[in-house]
Image (tube, rainbow, N blue to C red):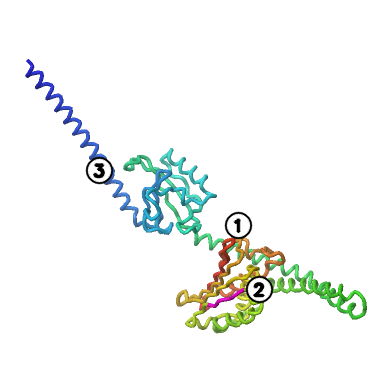
Amino acid sequence: MRRKARAIYCNQTLAERTKRKLTLTSQERDNDASYSVALSYQRLIKYLPEPIFVHDGIEVLFANQAGLRLLGMTELSEIMDEVKIWKFMHPDNQVRSMERIRAVMQTDEPNEFEECRLIDVSGEVIDVEVSSTRIHNYPGRGTVVQSVFRDIRGRKKEEEALIHSEKLSVAGQMAAGIAHEIRNPLTSLIGFSKFLKTKIDKYHEYFDIMLVELDRINSIVQEFMALAKPQASQFRKHDLNRIIGNVLTLLETQAILKDVQIIPQLDSEVTELLCDENQLKQVFVNVLKNAIEAMPSGGIITITLTNVDAQQIAVSIIDEGTGIPEEQLPKLGGPFFTTKDSGTGLGLMICYRIIEGHQGKMDIKSMPGKGTTVAIRLPRNL
């Protein structure tokens, strides 16, 4: 009887162990299958052109090659063992982005593409569109989120260029009307002031002040006229090294007085360019004067000239000045916007118009306290 009971107990124990083993093997098989599916999914999206990130709302679990490039990485492990999704969100977008992630975790419907901004590992702000959807049974995590991004920096630049071009057109029309209304009475005021100064022995110092101020108004009217009716361009082959050299000679005294050193880094291989020499001189003088004025305590300005490729030439003017706040950058070159205590903002508008007339592009980047970079690209031939 005891042997029979012992045999029954042993059989039950063996059965339970076998069942547990079979159950464990089944779970392992499920896990293996789940990991296999996840690996297949990762292989599938790894080389897709759209940046894709898989995350659980907090930690980034996987990023394809396009996603890594978007953030300036080759591997997620370059940052840390656990990469937090919110670390790459611009502070202005963090709350909204996390709300969208939490919402998509509650439904199988993907959310619509929406504009937001990311920050890559170098700190550069990236304009993107993002849409997310929920994924079930991700190994070790259960439900996760797949976020697909579109890099829209190129599109944003084109939109900004179009808006800026429209602003220039509107400003030109405004300038034409204002200059026409001011020019004739201003000419009379200047003429009669000079005449009265010769006829009245007293108050000459007041006449001098009046004439100085009238000359300032006249210079503003001249800027209006240049914006409203730009001179016909005379495009010829010119040596850009020589043009920049002439401008540096022109501004040498002003730079010395302000304790500013201008360092040219020119390229002798960049020779001829089809351009209007006087117009490009006007651009370089304006930008360099702005750079000098941005450094009241002195400093260094670097001007570089390089070949981009067989079709394009790049000129960069880099200063160590006070810099421009980020929120003001989109306004630069806009009608009558200036960061100076005294100024009209028309000089920069004219620069933009000249560069556009040369089928080129001018881009301004700045950081407060660190300086400003004005990057100009020009085609060799129009």
Tell me whether circle 3 and circle 2 mark residues in contact (CB < 8 Å): no
Q: Residues within 10 Å of mark 3 (few under 14, many from 20)?
A: few
Q: Is residue 262 magenta?
A: yes
Q: Nearer the viewer, residue 300 or 176?
A: 300
Q: Give the amino acid at mark 3.
A: Asp
Per the image, label 1 sits on a secondary structure element best described as helix
Q: Which mark is residue 327?
A: 1
Location of residue 249 with respect to 169 vertically, above or below: below
Q: Bounds of the magenta span?
A: 260-264
Q: CA distance from mark 1 to mark 3?
A: 52 Å
Judging by the rendered image, the residue that carries numbered circle 3 is 32
Q: Nearer the viewer, residue 258 or 51?
A: 258
Per the image, label 2 sits on a secondary structure element best described as loop
Q: Residues within 10 Å of mark 1 (few under 14, many from 20)?
A: few
Judging by the rendered image, the residue that carries numbered circle 2 is 258
**Magenta span: helix, strand or loop, mainly?**
strand
Q: Nearer the viewer, residue 90 or 154?
A: 90
**Place of residue 336 in the rendered image (x, y in percent of width and height, measured from the top left):** 69, 64
51 sits to left or right of 357: left
Residue lying at 52% horizontally and 45% vertically, measured from the top left: 96
Q: Give the amino acid at mark 1.
A: Glu
